[in-house]
Amino acid sequence: MLNALALATPADKIIRGKKNFEELLRYSSEKGAALALVYEKFGNPAGLKVFEPSGQKYLCPFSGVNVVRGLRSLLQKAKVGRVVVSNKQPVTEDARSLRNFFVSLPTEQSGQLVAHIDTQQKEDREIISLSVEGVECVSFYFRVKTVKR
């Protein structure tokens, strides 16, 4: 998932290695960008922990993620230069947070590709999809809580 996000967004991918959390925060603040950490549950990606340069932090849990394989060949050397967002607003707060995070990412000025962020609803799930040049790269699923009467 991390590789797909790095390819489909204008974000920098950082492998933590021996860097501690403070070093990661310092790096993101020097760039003036948010830091997003993928967290897992039972070995599977469960969401993002986002740390804004302003000091605000929030969790963005999702109920599932789908990553399209073979993205590297499509996006090998080109960078995302522009992000386009659909007009449909997310229903869930978590989906809205993730969408806003993707929109806030600084774009690569020399980038040639356009990333699209789309919001859909299917039954009890809301889906935020990232696609580049018409190829769906990553989809995040959020459960929509319905009130039963």
Image: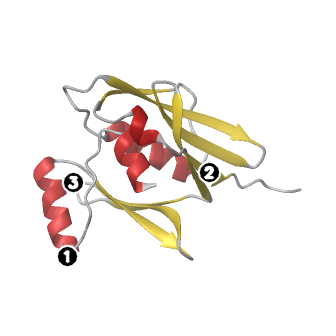
Q: Please report the residue visible at 26 percent of the width from the left and 63 percent of the height from the top.
A: 15
Disc 2 target residue = 141
Of mark 3 and mark 2, the one earlier in the sequence is 3
Indicate the quadrant where residue 112 lies: top left
Please name whichever residue, 98 or 68, is drawn nearer the observer in this view of the structure.
68
Q: Position of residue 12 (x, y in %)?
A: 25, 48
**Cβ atoms at labels 3 and 2 below 8 Å apart:** no
Disc 3 target residue = 53
Please name whichever residue, 120 or 108, is drawn nearer the observer in this view of the structure.
108
Look at the picture and state if 123 lies above or below 19: above
Image quarter where the C terminus lies is bottom right
In the current view of this chain or complex, which residue is farthest to the left?
30
Left or right side of 5 for 25: left
Q: Position of residue 64 (x, y in %)?
A: 61, 57
- The disc at residue 18 is 1
**Cβ atoms at labels 1 and 2 below 8 Å apart:** no
Q: Amino acid at mark 2?
A: Tyr
Left or right side of 114 for 131: right
